[in-house]
Image (cartoon, helix red, strand yellow):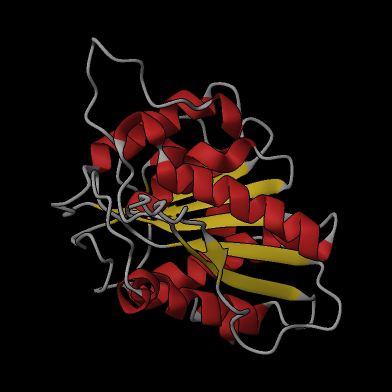
Amino acid sequence: MAQQATPVRSARLGRALGPEPTAVSGVVLLLPGGDETSGRRPSPMWATASVRALGRRLTRAGQTEGLAAHVVHYRFRGWNGSEAHLAGDASWAADEVVRRYGDVPVCLAGVDMGGRAALRAAGHTAVNSVLALAPWLPEEDVAAPPEPVKQLTGRRVLIVHGTNDERTDPELSFRLAARAKKSNRDVCRFEVHSDGHGLHQHRSEVHALAEDFVMGALFGRGLSRPLEDALAAPPPLGLRMPLASGFGKALRH
């Protein structure tokens, strides 16, 4: 009896969040979290819960500029060592944006393991910015090469991490940002004091900061003073910038 071939998995883009603009001039690719090792396919609900609220906010904010936001649905739930499946799916998604929309700027916005995927896939020619929320990064090992940062050159980068994160070590994202800052001045990092991995305690402020960053990176909107200061400040000041309670309220009034 002939052996049946195992179907090849493929990544895909979810439907655009909110009303898709007639003319798309910028795209946010939303990269959910994942596991360090897993061959399972992510369930739709598990995959999108961590990024959909952020995506809807960004879609509303960028509607007049022609922003489209899509969740990336991975082939596998895990990063899976040197396979780096999630980063590969992020790169594929950027290719798909070019195929669908042409030469438009792309922001990779990831949480947890999706943050690592966003940082790793930043070298794609369509990507001009990276937003990494509580990114999962591997423990540093003298026997292994450090997480690469060369691909971040020429991109605007914002990392946000809670100081009480017990799943992903905030010190690791600080060290990566410090290495990236040596060759790219457009790197900044905000610390959310007392918040944990999900950044639930100060979600409103985190999303306001993300909106400010993405609208500036994709469409050239003016940045808030805290973001400007963080990008301009030398290390470590611009990489340990505290996110103020109530951030974003003043921007809406």
Name the residue furthest top: 143
Name which residue lies at 46% across and 56% down.
9
From the image, which quarter does the C terminus lie in? Answer: bottom right
In this rendering, would 121 be left or right of 97? left
* Residue 55, horizontal then vertical, whole percent: 52, 75
In this rendering, would 205 be left or right of 209? left
Name the residue furthest front: 1
* Residue 136, horizontal then vertical, whole percent: 30, 45
In this rendering, would 88 be left or right of 39? right
Q: Quadrant of residue 171?
A: top left
Q: Is residue 221 visible?
A: no
Name the residue furthest left: 166
Above or below residue 152? Residue 103 is below
Name which residue lies at 56% across and 24% down.
150
- Asked whether 63 or 253 is in front, the reply is 63
Count of marks placed on residues: 0
* Residue 227, horizontal then vertical, whole percent: 55, 54
Above or below residue 109? Residue 249 is below
Q: Quadrant of residue 142?
A: top left
Name which residue lies at 21% across and 30% down.
139
Q: Is residue 200 visible?
A: yes
- Asked whether 143 or 154 is in front, the reply is 143
* Residue 19, horizontal then vertical, whole percent: 69, 89
Above or below residue 27? Residue 236 is above
Name which residue lies at 28% across and 66% down.
199
- Asked whether 108 or 198 is in front, the reply is 108
